[in-house]
Image (cartoon, rainbow, N blue to C red):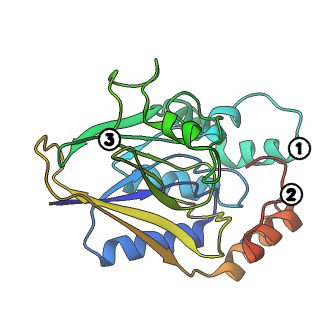
Amino acid sequence: MSKLAIISDIHGNLPAFEAVLEDIESRGITEIYCLGDLVGKGPSSDQVVDLALERCRYIVRGNWEEFLPQPTEFVSLQWHQRLLGQQRMDALQALPFSMEFWMSGRYVRLFHASPRSVYERVQPWDDYSRKLSLFESSDLSAEPIKADVAGYGDIHNAYMQHMDGRMLFNAGSVGNPLDMTQASYAILEGDLGGKSRTRLDLTFVRLPYDIERSIREARDREMPDLEPYIRELTTGRYRGLKD
C-alpha cells in the first residue's frame, strides 16, 4: 500500500509548510502531491517554491501560479513578483494542470479548483450537481475518463463527500486555512497504479504551527497588505483581494 500526502494552498507561509513537511516525514510518507497556490499572500513565496520543488513529487498549477507572473498594476502583486524572480515564475508557469492515476481500482484526478479551470470555485455548500461535475473530464484532462476520486484545493476548506459511489475531497490549505487556524493536508492510501478494487483510505490532518513566526516574517520583510494577512491567519476568515 502506498501513502500519498496531498497538500495545497501554501501561499508563501513557510512556518506552516515546514510543520506539515515535518509531520509528513514523521509518518514515513515520502510521496507528496501539491495542488497549487504555493505563492502569494504570505512573505516567503521564494523559499516555499524552492522547498516544494525539492520535496514534492508532483505539483499542479493553481490560480496564483497562473496570474502572478502576468504584468500587473497592483503594487502588492509586484512585490511578490520581485520576491520570486523570473526563474521561479517561469517554473510556476510550466506546471501541469492536473495529476491523474489509478489507485486501488479507482481513477483519481487531482487539480487545483476544477477539472476545467484554475479559477472555477466550488464550495462544500454548493449544490449537488455543481460538486458532481468535479468528477467529469475536460479538454485539460489527461484522459477522457470520469474520475472515481476527485481531489482539489483552492477554497481553503477541507471536506470529503461520497457522491453517487464516488469520492470528492478538498485537502484544505497548508498556509491560509479558512475553516480553522491550523494547517491542513490529506493522506490518500491505497494500491498506487492498481486497477483491481482494494482498500482505499483518506485521512485528514490538522496541525498547529507557529502563527506568530509567520506574522513576524511578514513584518520583517515589510510585506504589503500585512493587516489583512494577519487577520486571515489569526481568525481563519478571508478579507483580502484575491484568494
Q: Mark 1 points at which residue?
A: 75
Q: How much space separates mark 2 and mark 1, taking CA atoms? A: 8 Å
Task: Confirm or deny contact between disc 2 and disc 3 (CB under 8 A).
Answer: no
Q: Residue 148 carries which label?
A: 3
The correct choice, above or below, for 233 with respect to 195 in the image is below
Q: How much space separates mark 3 and mark 1, taking CA atoms? A: 42 Å
Q: Is 14 or 151 nearer to us in this picture? A: 151
**Amino acid bearing label 3:** Asp
Q: Residues within 10 Å of mark 1 (few under 14, many from 20)?
A: few
Q: How much space separates mark 2 and mark 3, taking CA atoms? A: 42 Å
Asked which secondary structure carries label 3, the reply is: loop
Mark closest to the chain's N terminus, 2 or 1: 1
Give residue 78's position: percent from left, percent from top: 81, 41
Q: Which numbered disc, 2 or 3, marks the residue closer to the eye?
A: 3
Give residue 221's position: percent from left, percent from top: 78, 65
Q: Is residue 155 left or right of residue 48?
A: right
Task: Tell me where residue 182 sits by quadrant.
Answer: bottom right
Task: Tell me where residue 87 sits by quadrant.
Answer: top right
